[in-house]
Amino acid sequence: MKEVFDLRGRVALVTGGSRGLGFGIAQGLAEAGCSVVVASRNLEEASEAAQKLTEKYGVETMAFRCDVSNYEEVKKLLEAVKEKFGKLDTVVNAAGINRRHPAEEFPLDEFRQVIEVNLFGTYYVCREAFSLLRESDNPSIINIGSLTVEEVTMPNISAYAASKGGVASLTKALAKEWGRYGIRVNVIAPGWYRTKMTEAVFSDPEKLDYMLKRIPLGRTGVPEDLKGVAVFLASEEAKYVTGQIIFVDGGWTAN
Ligand SMILES: NC(=O)c1ccc[n+]([C@@H]2O[C@H](COP(=O)([O-])OP(=O)(O)OC[C@H]3O[C@@H](n4cnc5c(N)ncnc54)[C@H](OP(=O)(O)O)[C@@H]3O)[C@@H](O)[C@H]2O)c1
C-alpha cells in the first residue's frame, strides 16, 4: 500500500512562511517530503526559514521577497516558482496582518491595508497560481481564516474580521468555480496561537485568562498544531474535500 499523506514530488508555496503559523505549516509540508517556496516581505527571514526546512527535512526550498498586497510582486513570485520548479501543487495563503482600533475611529489607511494584505493578497496569489495549479493532478489551495469567521472574539478588530470573512467567502466562491479543474480550495481557521501578531494579546494576563477559559483543550495553540490538517488538505487523501472551513482551535468554536 502506498504511504498516506505523502507529499514527495510535490511543490508548495507558503506566503507568510517565514515565521509563525505559516512556518508551522511549511514544516509539516516539508516533513511530508514537499518542496517549499517561502514568501514574505523580509527576504532574510524568508531565506532563514527556507534554510531551516532544507536542513531539517532535506527538501528543496526557495525563498522569495514579495508583498502579497502588490499585484506586480505576486506575478513575479509565481513566475519565479514556475522558473525554478516548473510546477505547483499547493498554495498556502498565510501572509496576514492585524491592526486594532475602535471601529468608529479606525484610520482608513490602516483599515484598507488590512483588507489589501489579507483579502486582496489572498486573491492575487490564488489568481496568479491558477495556471500552474491547473496543470497539477492534485491542486490544493489552503487559505488561512480565523475564529472571526465564526465569532468575533475581541473588540477593535473590525478590519481584520472583515478581511477574514472575505477570505472565507472567497474560498467558497473559488471552490465552486475551480472545482471543474480539480482545484480544491479550503480554509484552515486557527484559534489562538502565540505569534508576533498576537503578542500584545498574550502578554495581557486578563486576555490570556479569558482565552484559556474558553478553550476546552485547556491550552492555546502552537504553530505545529496546524501541520496535520495542512498536510491532509494538500494530500491525495483530501481529494474530495473542498470549500470547507476547518477550525483548529482546541475546541473554542464548540462552545
Ligand atoms: N496567531 C494567531 O492566533 C492567528 C489566529 C488566526 C489566524 N491567524 C492568521 O495566521 C496567519 C499568520 O499569522 P501569524 O500569527 O503567524 O503572524 P506573524 O507571526 O506576524 O506572521 C505573519 C507572516 O506574514 C508575513 N506577511 C505579513 N504581511 C505580508 C505581506 N504584505 N506580504 C507578504 N507577507 C506578509 C510575515 O512576514 P513579513 O512581515 O516579513 O512580510 C510573516 O511571515 C495570518 O493570516 C493570521 O491572520 C493567526
Image (spheres, rainbow, N blue to C red):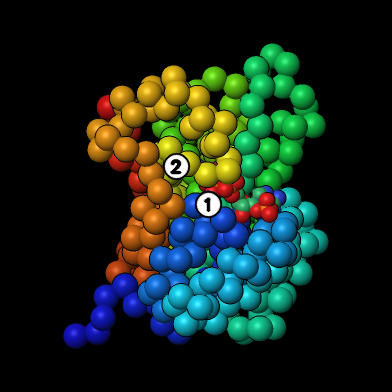
Amino acid at dot 2: Tyr
Identify the residue at horizontal 72%, vertical 58% (top origin).
42
Q: Mark 2 or 1 closer to N-term?
A: 1
How crowded pointer 1 is (Cα within 10 Å; few <14, some 14-19, many 20+) is rated as some
Give coordinates of residue 86: x percent, y percent: 62, 84
Identify the residue at horizontal 30%, vertical 69% (top origin).
237
Picture quadrant of residue 247 = top left
* Residue 119 visible in rendering: no
Q: Are marks 2 and 1 in contact (CB under 8 Å)?
A: yes
Amino acid at dot 1: Gly
Q: Nearer the viewer, residue 252 or 134?
A: 252
* Residue 49 visible in rendering: yes
- In this picture, residue 235 sits left or right of residue 115: left
Mark 2, residue position:
193
Q: Is mark 1 within 8 Å of ligand 1?
A: yes
Q: Is mark 2 within 8 Å of ligand 1?
A: yes
Which type of secondary structure does the marked residue at label 2 adopt?
loop
Mark 1, residue position:
20
Against 168, is 200 above or below?
above
Identify the residue at horizontal 78%, vertical 27% (top origin).
108
Give coordinates of residue 105: x percent, y percent: 73, 16
Q: Residue furthest top?
A: 104
- In this picture, residue 214 sits left or right of residue 23: left
How crowded pointer 2 is (Cα within 10 Å; few <14, some 14-19, many 20+) is rated as some
